[in-house]
Image: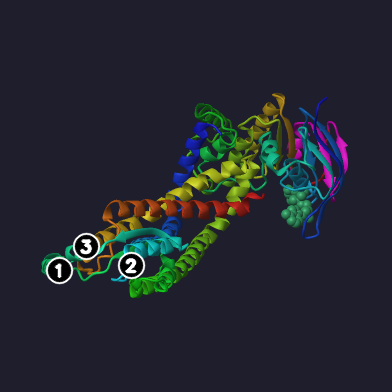
Amino acid sequence: MICMIEMKGVYKTYPNGVTALNGIDVHIDQGEFVYVVGPSGAGKSTFTKLMFREEKATKGTVNVNNFNLTTIKEKKVPFLRRNVGVVYQDFRLLPRLTVYENVAFALEVIEESPNQIRRRVMDVLDQVRLKNKARFIPDELSGGEQQRVSIARAIVNRPRLLIADEPTGNLDPDTSWEIMHILEEINAKGTTVLMATHSQEIVNTIRKRVIAIEDGQIVRDEARGEYGYEI
Amino acid sequence: MKFKTLGRHAREGTKSVWRNGWMTISAVGAVTTTLLLVGVFLALMLNLNEIAGNIEDDVEVKVLVELTADEQQVSELENNLGDLPAVGELTYSSKEEELDELVDSLGDQGKAFELFEQSNPLNDAFIIKPDNPVDAVQIAEEAEAMDQVDEVDFGEEIVQRLFQFNEYARYIGLGLIVGLVFTAIFLISNTIKITIIARKKEIGIMKLVGATNAFIRWPFFVEGLILGVLGSIIPIAAVMSGYYYLYYNLQDRIQFDFIQLLPFNPFAFQLAGLILVIGAFIGVWGSVMSVRKFLKV
Ligand SMILES: Nc1ncnc2c1ncn2[C@@H]1O[C@H](COP(=O)(O)OP(=O)(O)OP(=O)(O)O)[C@@H](O)[C@H]1O
Ligand SMILES: [Mg+2]
């Protein structure tokens, strides 16, 4: 098995003194599909943010897709991020760009040809059912629609690793399932998927590895786990 | 970077100019104000410089030889003058030549002096051009002390006034430069501050999607270039038409012939080019500086 993510003795303390991660050791192979569950404030988002260097670990080592994030040079970070698609809990769309442009941006940074860009962007927009809103700007979309744009952007360049922080948080059940199918499909094509979620239904229905985090520590790690929390 | 990507950056930069709306207008306004001042100042400085240069070129020391001096003594004097270190060019002008020149310079009135041709009352003279006009005074003093020298003439007043004037011009120029630089910095950094909040987040997102710093910087570069060029339109028009008016209307009324304005063509066009370049520079500089702080995400 080829290693995709490895963390050893990782601690994260934010500048304001909050310790979000408290000694994390984890190993995730290429091609895995992993749920990250746990109560609000447990450190799930922080855990994912370490993997594309949005945050730096205070202590410990983080390896992702053969990049050592503890020693990586600032100049190399963009190249790490190009292999990691991220769906953010708060979307992070470029407010002045249209839906189409937001998704295309991920391909523009890797200097894809305009023809390729057009084709792939239209493809993913179709996948997330947003083709008819391609010319809208994020402010003109509902929360669920913005989330789907964020997903489209994350998957458009077929990353090796897809990190999704509550990708179904704002979606109705039907759309949620569609998104899950997209994620499964991508996973089937070889992309490692890491998904933080509060959805008991999804975790218990599409059974995958489950990592549970509480108070910044991994308290459970099961190959075909369950959600395990009462709602 | 691929060539196509450059096209993308140009497109994005242009779009951004439109999208920024009133921000664009205020940035262009800042550049316009600065360039108007720079343009006027440049026109002034370059002309002053030219005038000063003209006068300095004209500085010469005339050493009049005693009427009684014989040939031997004249050539001795010539050697002595030639040995002075500050002397650039040394030419001998006989009294006949001196008279011719006097007659020429007086035009019609000069005809009267032709009578003197038989009994020329003028001295033979040496005309010295100093290497550096500032040394004229020193040369004059040293020449005055030599034998067989009747009189030394170097237009003392003009030279003295010129050097004083030149010094003032430089102080004024320096003051203006400092003032302009501060104005420009203030205006531009103020405008940039306004855009910072909106852009900080955008730049952060771009970086998270995998954009390199250069990729992010390029459209800003283009945007700054456009802002700078837009900002130079009014100053170029103003300075050129202003200079046109000055050159063609005022020039005739200025009596001193050493005050020659630089000719409209090509000077006004060179000035326009210079304003354009400075405008582009200010725009690019301001824009790229504004991004720099936010690239560390
Ligand atoms: N940028 C930050 N600065 C300071 N503290 C932070 C920051 N981000 C998160 N925290 C703190 O770190 C802890 C973990 O936050 P995190 O966002 O990782 O939780 P989470 O498990 O994702 O929660 P949720 O399920 O609500 O998304 C919380 O106590 C939070 O207040
Ligand atoms: Mg979270």
Quarter residue A208 falls in: top right
The local crowd at label 1, few if under 14, some if 14 to 19, many if 20 or more residues have their Cα within 10 Å, is: few
Q: Which residue is mark 1?
A: B116
Q: Which residue is mark 3?
A: B96
Residue kind at label 1, given as amino acid type:
Phe
Q: Which residue lies at the image location 46% right of the left edge and 70% below the top edge?
A: B175
Q: Is residue A213 magenta?
A: yes
Q: Which residues are magenta?
A: A198-224
- Disc 1 secondary structure class: helix
Q: Nearer the viewer, mark 1 or mark 2?
A: 1
- Disc 2 secondary structure class: strand
The chain that hosts pointer 2 is B
The chain that hosts pointer 3 is B
Q: Nearer the viewer, mark 2 or mark 3?
A: 3
Mark 2 and mark 3: span between their CA atoms?
15 Å
The chain that hosts pointer 1 is B
Residue B242 on image: x %, y %:
28, 62
Name the N-terminal-most of marks 3 and 1: 3
Mark 1 and mark 2: span between their CA atoms?
21 Å
Residue A79 on image: x %, y %:
68, 36
Residue B166 on image: x %, y %:
40, 69
The residue carrying mark 3 has its beta carbon less than 8 Å from ligand 1: no
Name the N-terminal-most of marks 1 and 2: 2
Using the image as rendered, state which of residue B241 and residue B226 is in the foreground. Answer: B241
Relative placement, left or right, of A93 versus A196 is: left
Q: Which residue lies at the image location 35% right of the left edge and 55% below the top edge?
A: B271
Query: How is the rendered protein coloured?
Result: rainbow
Q: Which mark is residue B62?
A: 2
Using the image as rendered, state which of residue B167 and residue A209 is in the foreground. Answer: B167
